[in-house]
Image: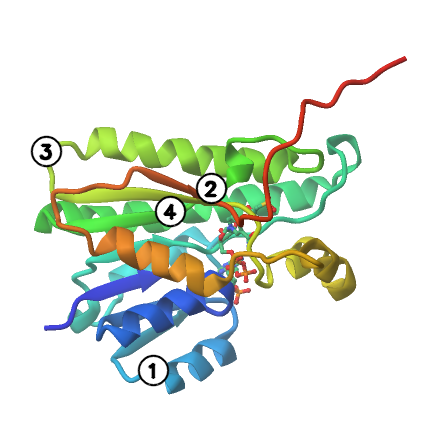
Amino acid sequence: MPKTVFITGATAGFGKAMAERYAAEGWQLILTGRRQERLDELKSTLDVPVHTICFDIRDKAACQAAVADLPAEFSDIDILVNNAGLALGVEPAQKCDIEEWECMVDTNIKGLLYITRAVLEGMVERDKGHIVNLGSVAGTYPYPGGNTYGGTKAFVNHFSKNLLADLLGTRIRVTNIEPGMCESEFSVVRFRGDKSKADNVYEGTESIQPEDIAEIVYWTTTLPPHVNINSLEVMPVDQAFSPFAVNRK
Ligand code: NDP
Ligand code: 8X3
């Protein structure tokens, strides 16, 4: 029986690269996202059993059904990768659109919670499993325009550690991956479809690629079962920290 990995947000970026990475090792996949054609296209390129589920992760009932209605051969989930997420905008807080803030909270926090809660019970019953969350450096280090996105990722970073506290005594692992600048559709989404603004983010630097994140996630989940990577922060060599900003009169 092949091992099963459930990856949310597999239609692009990290999720797609992770699907390809696990498939290359013969894992069977549950892949989700809102774009059915992308899920179909990806499935057609993979040489392992793949179950696709097209739904919006902000929809609690759809999240619960996605897990409850899994075909029997996919229902024993070994790894859940909570990857679906997004940032919207880089404006200062006082200029932000409240609906975009709600969208980030509903996707990055509430969607992750719906899926985690639905999958966790089975993992605890089987006393086996690994939950990998996609947090971010934005959840640890503030920056101008990070506001609610950073807040949602701070939630993910901290929720991951709290899960570990609750799961002590089980054989379930929890890992929070906290990337910095990575090239994917992330910035196109953040700049609401403006490709040239998105390209500027990566211009002249060597960003981390989705395949790099896939490799890291794969590594954390294939270590010996008594080893848990709690959190892993990763940035490109071309990214670092700045001094505190000071307003001078
Ligand atoms: P992409 O934009 O390339 O991919 C995001 C994925 O999330 C897509 O598959 C998208 O699928 C899915 N998604 C977004 N909203 C929803 C929704 N409402 N319902 C279901 N699926 C949804 O971004 P990345 O691959 O870069 O990002 C993946 C994760 O990593 C995110 O959580 C992001 O915050 C995090 N991250 C990214 C970094 C970066 O610099 N790229 C750095 C640190 C963390 P679809 O649109 O088909 O629904
Ligand atoms: C994405 C990384 O620095 O763009 O989480 O917020 S950053």
Q: Tag 4 or tag 2, which sits nearer the N-term? A: 2
How far apart marks 2 and 1 lie (CA) works out to 30 Å
Q: Tag 2 or tag 3, which sits nearer the N-term? A: 2
Residue behind mark 1? 46
Disc 1 within 8 angstroms of ligand 1 (CB): no
How far apart marks 3 and 2 lie (CA) works out to 26 Å
Instruction: Count residues near mark 3 (Cα–Cα under 10 Å), then give few for <14, some for 14-19, many for 20+.
Output: few
Whether the residues at callouts 3 and 1 have beta carbons within 8 Å, the answer is no
Give the structural element (helix, strand or loop) at label 4: strand
Q: Name which residue type carries label 4.
A: Asn
Give the structural element (helix, strand or loop) at label 2: helix
Whether the residues at callouts 4 and 3 have beta carbons within 8 Å, the answer is no
Q: Residue at x 55, y 55 (%)?
A: 182
Give the structural element (helix, strand or loop) at label 3: loop
Q: Tag 1 or tag 2, which sits nearer the N-term? A: 1
Q: Tag 3 or tag 4, which sits nearer the N-term? A: 4
Q: Name which residue type carries label 1.
A: Leu
